[in-house]
């Protein structure tokens, strides 16, 4: 049985990712409107009736703005940490949200979702690794730095959505005020093209078939810069730029991952590798 992955939107204007098999699926974040989620999934031939849960990475608007309407129209559990749920825009999840703990796997049918703590300027931010039949997909965006948790999870993934938020030169010479530039590059904002590339070059597993590069800044990055940087060193890994304006194509993988591929190993130390 296959596993399907799609970015429905990726950027500061909204984030939402679909991962599922033939029976069930999950969404990571709902940062675009319910109507757009419905429209984009329909165009991709994906069904919301298969979506059994939505997982919230953190409380910023571009990750939750469509959440309330989505679960009202399509009732499903919302997985969110206690600290994230205390945000005003998530108060309605009290009594509905299901709490998760870092590194503790959650079963959604045959899917297993593992939360991975990360550095970001939010209350309790997490990335997620979704596994099915030995195939693993990682959603790694909104990270201020590359840390041991990220490296450990990234090395197990057959497909990853990885943030490549900004080009350092464009950010430095652009029109953002200094405090915003420091927020972006200061260790709790986002990772740059070069930080993402370093992670890919040093820790890409040999079985990684697809890399979706996401959360590109509208003002401090260019898709063509990112695509050229990664494509020239990608080898057998297919590079896809996840758009901030439309859904990606569906990436479909067979559920035949080899048993000798590395298993996820929890890293209890939460120390940065770089930055």
Image (spheres, rainbow, N blue to C red):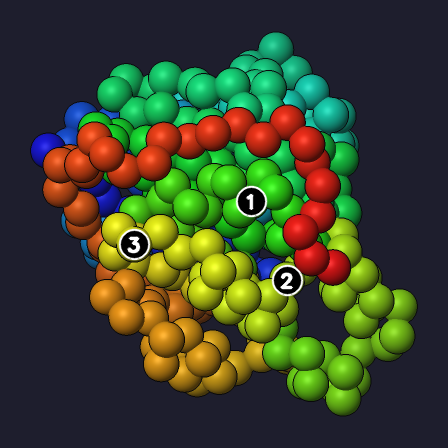
First of labels 1, 2 by sequence position: 1
The outermost residue toward the bottom is 173
**Who's the residue at 59% across and 24% down the image?**
102
- Taking 214 as reference, is 109 left or right? left
Which of 267 and 52 lies nearest the eye of the viewer?
A: 267
**Would you place residue 221 above or below residue 140 in this image?**
below
Identify which residue is drawn at 51% across, 68% down.
Answer: 197
Q: Earlier in the sequence, mark 2 or mark 3?
A: 2
Q: Quadrant of the C terminus?
A: bottom right
Q: Quadrant of residue 81?
A: top right
Question: In the image, is residue 197 above or below residue 80?
Answer: below
Image mark for residue 107 = none
Residue at the disc numbered 3: 206
Q: Compute the Cα span from label 2 to label 3.
A: 23 Å
Q: Does label 1 or label 3 sit earlier along the sequence?
A: 1
Q: Nearer the viewer, residue 228 or 68?
A: 228
Residue 249 in view = yes
Query: Alpha carbon of mark 1 to alpha carbon of mark 2: how far?
Result: 12 Å
Q: Which residue is mark 1?
A: 150
Q: Position of residue 235 (x, y in %)?
A: 28, 70
Q: Position of residue 267 (x, y in %)?
A: 58, 31
Q: Which mark is residue 191?
A: 2
Q: Residue at x 61, y 11 (%)?
A: 95
Q: Residues within 10 Å of mark 2 (few under 14, many from 20)?
A: many
Q: CA distance from mark 1 to mark 3?
A: 17 Å
Of residue 64 and residue 167, the one placed in the foreground of this image is 167
Measuring 37% from the left and 75% from the top, which residue is drawn there?
Answer: 233
């Amino acid at each position: 049985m296959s596993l399907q992955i799609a970015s429905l939107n990726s950027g500061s204007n909204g984030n939402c990712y679909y991962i599922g098999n033939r029976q069930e699926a999950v969404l990571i974040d709902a940062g675009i409107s319910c109507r757009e989620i419905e429209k984009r999934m329909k165009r991709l031939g994906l069904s919301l009736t298969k979506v059994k849960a939505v997982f919230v990475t953190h409380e910023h608007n571009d990750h939750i703005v469509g959440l309330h309407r989505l679960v009202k129209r399509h009732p499903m559990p919302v997985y969110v940490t206690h600290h994230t749920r205390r945000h005003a825009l998530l108060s309605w999840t009290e009594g509905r949200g299901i709490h998760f703990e870092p590194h503790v796997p959650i079963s959604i049918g045959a899917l297993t979702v593992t939360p991975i703590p990360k550095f970001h300027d939010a209350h309790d931010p997490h990335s997620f690794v979704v596994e099915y039949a030995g195939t693993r997909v990682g959603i790694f965006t909104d990270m201020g730095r590359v840390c041991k948790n990220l490296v450990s999870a990234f090395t197990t993934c057959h497909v990853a959505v990885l943030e490549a938020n900004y080009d350092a030169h464009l950010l430095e010479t652009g029109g953002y005020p200094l405090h915003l530039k420091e927020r972006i590059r200061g260790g709790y904002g986002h990772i740059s093209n070069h930080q993402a590339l370093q992670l890919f070059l040093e820790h890409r597993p040999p079985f990684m078939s697809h890399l979706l590069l996401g959360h590109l800044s509208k003002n401090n990055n260019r898709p063509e810069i990112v695509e050229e940087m990664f494509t020239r060193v990608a080898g057998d890994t297919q590079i896809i730029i996840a758009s901030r304006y439309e859904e990606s194509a569906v990436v479909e993988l067979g559920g035949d991952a080899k048993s000798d591929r590395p298993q996820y190993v929890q890293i209890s130390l939460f120390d940065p590798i770089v930055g």
